[in-house]
Amino acid sequence: MPVQNNQIFVRTTGKTEIVDLTPQISREVKESSVVNGAVTVFVPGSTAAITTIEFESGVINDLRKAIDRMAPEDVYYEHNERWGDGNGYAHVRAAMIGPSLHIPIVEGKMTLGTWQQIVLLDFDNRPRSRRIVVQIS
Amino acid sequence: MPVQNNQIFVRTTGKTEIVDLTPQISREVKESSVVNGAVTVFVPGSTAAITTIEFESGVINDLRKAIDRMAPEDVYYEHNERWGDGNGYAHVRAAMIGPSLHIPIVEGKMTLGTWQQIVLLDFDNRPRSRRIVVQIS
Amino acid sequence: MPVQNNQIFVRTTGKTEIVDLTPQISREVKESSVVNGAVTVFVPGSTAAITTIEFESGVINDLRKAIDRMAPEDVYYEHNERWGDGNGYAHVRAAMIGPSLHIPIVEGKMTLGTWQQIVLLDFDNRPRSRRIVVQIS
């Protein structure tokens, strides 16, 4: 079975918006007809990240607050002084969470837990159009 | 060589217990007869994570303390208010560390460092039976 | 196409030095002749990590400061008391950021964003010679 490359396009509000990508990725896994394999979810860009979480608005807000504490928007960033775009915190958050996720496919389905969703975190300080690479093999 | 899907089952105490999975995964890599390939270690569920660390009880406690500081158990979590299960911190920690790890296999062995072990972190606030997917290809 | 295993050797100063690996990895991807596939970047060792960031000295310093706040060098570490090597903070940081990155290759190129570079973070408290495994498949 050759590698299958798909893309998802998402418009975000930025400002640590968290978007559930699971329905689209699940559909692509199903349409790929891969029975035993894996899916890689990768976000190109240096101000966004990929992880998994229960997509429930309470805990989504909790995650946003924890990330705010880890890399606050309002501390001093050299990046902002040099480039004036005010999104230094977004770069730092993205590097700490990471842009990539690799999930096994077993018997035609991703091995996610029942309450475990794949999410995009867009840390930038403005709305963005994001492309997510979904590679199935 | 086809994809080989294995599973490890672990009983944990929860409460950020950290479990060394390396002996079992190394055995599965050996039994797979894969010479050049990779292993994916993935934990289904939204309150656990996978990473590597030197499995030495001092630094294991140090990691637990650092994660406690990053997402403390006793701050306010919306998740707890809505669902009453008290494990909001566990969801947040799991999302920040991540559920997946991908390790090359070269000449029949994982390319881990000498003091680098693969660990499960179970952040839930109660004992759990965990299934870890170990995919070798 | 068989799996291709390459290595990169880097001398670092330690102390959370952040090194851009992108030029070397891009060259290896090009020389591999893989058109549709993926690259895994993995650092053996328990005091270093791999992630992506815009390799711009301002935001690199910002990331170092954020990681310093997350796992400060000067808090108490059990690891230091037991082993006397003073690098407990390095182990904790490495476990929190993670040693592995998986990036799709589409049409012969990694799907990195324009300002997104692959970096090694060496957290150890002394200069190190690091080997990074670059697996292309």
Image: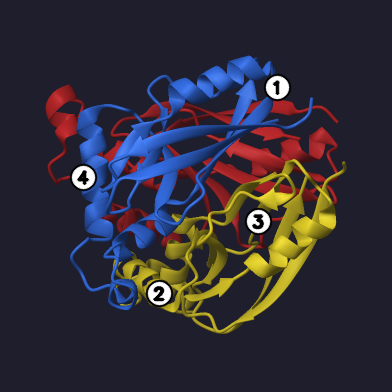
Chain colours: A blue, B red, C yellow
- Name the amino acid, label 3: Val
Distance between mark 4 and mark 1 Cα atoms: 38 Å
Q: Residue at x 69, y 40 (%)?
A: B39
- Give the Cα separation between the discs numbered 2 and 4: 26 Å
Marks 4 and 3, Cα distance to the nearest angstrom? 33 Å
Question: Which quadrant, please, contains the C terminus of chain A?
Answer: top right
Q: Which residue is mark 2?
A: C81
User: Where's residue B71, x and y in %?
Assistant: 26, 50
Give percent across and percent down for residue A96: 41, 57
Chain letter of mark 3 equals C
Q: Mark 4 near mark 1, Cβ–Cβ under 8 Å?
A: no
Name the residue that disc number 3 marks: C41
Q: Are marks 2 and 3 on the same chain?
A: yes
Residue visible at 75% across and 39% down in the picture = B29
Graded by Cα atoms within 10 Å as few (under 14), some (14 to 19) or many (20 or more), the crowding at tag 3 reads many
Horizontal side of A66 relative to C95 (left or right) equals left
The amino acid marked with disc number 4 is Glu
Q: Position of residue A127 (x, y in %)?
A: 30, 45
Q: Which mark is residue B73?
A: 4
Q: Are marks 2 and 4 on the same chain?
A: no
Q: Secondary structure at mark 3?
A: strand
Question: Can you identify the residue that label 1 sits on?
Answer: A36
